[in-house]
Amino acid sequence: MLKKLFAVTTLATMSGAVFAADAPALPFGLSFSGSAAVTTDYRFRGVTQTENDPAVQAGFTLAHTSGLYFGLWGSNVNFGSGTPSLELDPSLGYATTLEAFSSKPTVDVGVVYYNYPSASDLNWAELYGKLGFKSVIAEGDSILTNLNYTNDYAGADADSWNVNVGYSVPFGSSGFGGVGAVGYTVVDEDKYTFNGDDNYVDWKVGVTYGFKSISGASAELAAVGTNIDTNGLSDVAERAVDTGAVFTLTKTF
């Protein structure tokens, strides 16, 4: 039922790193940025990718001043016996700031390829578009909207759409902040279902903390889950989609 459900995670999104202001300068208009993270449960779109076990993750982005970028992101995964233990996702895209608008939103479009070196039959590609806004409701907050499409969801040759809206806000100068996100995924039910349904909703609500003594270091504690029907699922499969606590440490550079 749940072969795999994942994409570029929000905690270490390669395209998001394109906008890092302190990325080290390279020749020919290039810049490099990246991140590394340790998390108690690799979840994407609300569903565990590691059978609720911890994951170590890292990614980098090589960007050009034109807005073009290439990214690579990796993590350990575990979908059960006989499934791949490594996910390695390259992406190619274009990101820019719309200076003509007073809110100066950021636009990011591209394609990501979910790649399993030891199980190529599970590989699939997805197109994405993102629109981001800053200081919308409170000073320093941000809103990020994603729209994703694939015609080969989870390697099952199925059309699928996903939309996600995320919000983050700092709590003054305390270093603490709040995060929240809600997503909706729909798929061609003739080729793939989520325990009998062709769609589901996922969510995340949590708090963050930025370490002032370590540049680029942050922590997040969040509740993550879905509304996928768990009737008839095994205990392992039920835990994979139920709401659970996830703690993540991230370092960007």
Image (spheres, rainbow, N blue to C red):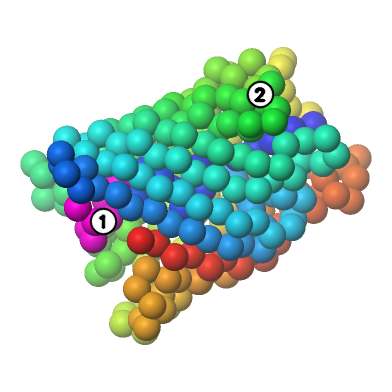
Q: Residue at x 24, y 56 (%)?
A: 24
Q: Is residue 21 magenta?
A: yes
Q: Which element carries disc 1, helix, strand or loop?
A: loop
Q: Which mark is residue 23?
A: 1
Whether tag 2 and tag 1 are in contact, CB under 8 A, the answer is no
- For the N terminus, give its image quadrant: top right
- Foreground residue, 157 or 250? 250
Image coordinates for residue 164, horizontal then vertical, percent: 47, 43
- Quarter of the image holding residue 55? bottom right
Image coordinates for residue 11, horizontal then vertical, percent: 48, 56
Q: Residue at x 32, y 80 (%)?
A: 172
Which secondary structure is most common in the magenta stretch? loop
Disc 1 residue type (three-letter):
Ala
Q: Is residue 88 magenta?
A: no
Image coordinates for residue 130, horizontal then vertical, percent: 35, 39
Q: Which element carries disc 2, helix, strand or loop?
A: helix
Relative to 124, is 18 above or below?
below
Q: Give the class, few, some or many, for how many residues have Cα within 10 Å of label 1's Cα (few <14, many ≥20).
A: some
Q: Which residues are magenta?
A: 18-25
The number of numbered discs placed on residues in the rendered structure image is: 2
